[in-house]
Amino acid sequence: MKKLITLSVMCLVAIAAVAKEYAQEQPDSIKTQELKEVVVNASYLTREDDHISAIPTKEQRKHAVSGYDLLRNLMIPGISVNRTTGSVTTPAGTATLYIDGREVDFREVQSLRPKDIARVEYFDIPTGKYAKDAAAINFVLRTLNNGGYTQLDAMQGLGYLNGDYNLISKYVVGNKSINLWAGYSLENPKSTLDETESFNFEDGILNRNNTYSNVGNRDSEEYVQASISNRGNKYIWMLRGGIAWTDSRNDVGNGIVNYWLTDAAFNDGDVVNLHSKNKTMRPSLYFFGMHTFSENKRLDYVADGYYSRNDFNRQYKDNDALYKSLVKEDYWYTKLNANYSWTLSHRNSLVFTFYEFLRVSDSDYSGTAAYNQNLRSSETILFVDYSQRLGRFFYDINPGLSFLTYRLKGMKSINHLTPRLQARAAYMIDRKQQLQFAFALGNTYPRINTINNVEQQIDPIIILKGNPDMDNSILLSPRLSYNLNLNKIALQAGVSYFYQNHSIISDYYIREGNLISTFRDDCIYCGVLKNIDGSEGLRL
């Protein structure tokens, strides 16, 4: 906590000094902006070609304290908001969040003041730079030329130790904006467990019952993050950096575990002690830039990366038998993205998109198993997106190609060249009704927890094991939906189908009296989802 307070004070002092310098440099000016088209609609939800535009009402702003609160209060059909985790789901999948067209993280949306949000755009038919997303939500902010604010919010729970404290500071001087986020959260709940498991061995079914009560768990997080950005007429940029620490602990003392074969007597039980700690330190750096060459040509790009140091320590003691799992992981992640947008003259547009993902995971295992595991993966994705409006009909096609290469330590490199495709179409029946169709084809990337070569015995029965021979998963999903938007009532009904080959699932088998828990990919997953979602504009 001391290092968090020290970092926050240093950042505030730096912000004040930079703000003063910018204030001296910036002359007074009057800016004008030409409005090319104004659309007025009686409802706070307006249907456009590829998205729904929501202008929050006074009541919706009044009952919100963050960007997630306001998004939930808007009650846009199909959107479900988890304000605690920052997850926003739609019928098409998890939505990617943006602020003024720039992809953002949880902290930035959480710290948004409702009165600073001019409108929210929900792209249920993502096109252009959003075409890669299952769905996209863009918070459009009001322009603030000078001034700023500093706010502190705190939440303290009763009954057990549970608190969340956050500091947000923003200063705007002319075209430049400086932001600071810092916070600390702590949760220390009690938990009780009474669980029975059954293991089907060749000699019969072995049952296990675990019981413990009033166990203390502890989860804490500290973070500090700062950014500086500049908004010009032709060029916008933002630089952001930060660091976060998390600490999660679970301590079970004097729990009871009972083993018995089916139709056999229940034994007196063994005493179990379980102690686990998971600590993470993660510094990050982010840069965003956007060039506007003309009214119909624009380029935006992102360089985003972080390093994560993860320490995991688990000790399971069953009477006199001790099982240790100690893992120290170094993880590097880098994402490069560039989007070139070109608006053409016949109500159509063209966007070229490039992605490069680099992931490196290096893990040292000790305890009951000593091993070093390294996974390096690179994925390059190219997209071309074309959209066209023809009367009441609108369509968007987004073909692409993905080249994935990865190498696990001690094995040859594995390469996959996979086609990508997203296609969407919409027909506007009238100003209040619309039919939509969407189709998506994609693939997954490997994770070290599923494809490693390591074996870890975590208790007297179970051994965890990865599977390095798994294939790349291919995902396929078509969707059809109907949207109705009245003045105070909005409705969405739809049906979707999801198909995945080489689906990764858990797998179990018996070896030398132990249950081996591993993974397999020779499976196919498919399912049909039907949904009807409505909202009433004046209800909160």
Image: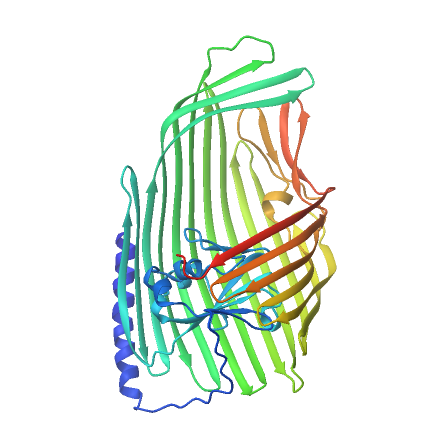
Q: Position of residue 331 (x, y in %)?
A: 52, 53
> Which colour style is shown?
rainbow
- For the point 26% across and 57% down, the residue is 5
Q: Position of residue 514 (x, y in %)?
A: 62, 24
Quarter assignment of residue 444 = bottom right
In the rendered view of the protein, which quadrant contains the C terminus?
bottom left
Nearest the eye: 144 or 184: 144
Q: Position of residue 103 (x, y in %)?
A: 50, 67
Nearest the eye: 28 or 438: 438
Residue 39 in sight in this render: yes
Nearest the eye: 124 or 293: 124
Quarter assignment of residue 11 = bottom left
Residue 113 in sight in this render: no
Q: Position of residue 127 (x, y in %)?
A: 62, 71
Q: Residue furthest top?
A: 265
Q: Count the marks: how many?
A: 0
Quarter assignment of residue 278 = top left
Going by the image, does 390 lie left or right of 86?
Answer: right
Going by the image, does 362 lie left or right of 211?
Answer: right
In the rendered image of this protein, does residue 470 appear above or below residue 95?
A: above
Nearest the eye: 405 or 189: 189
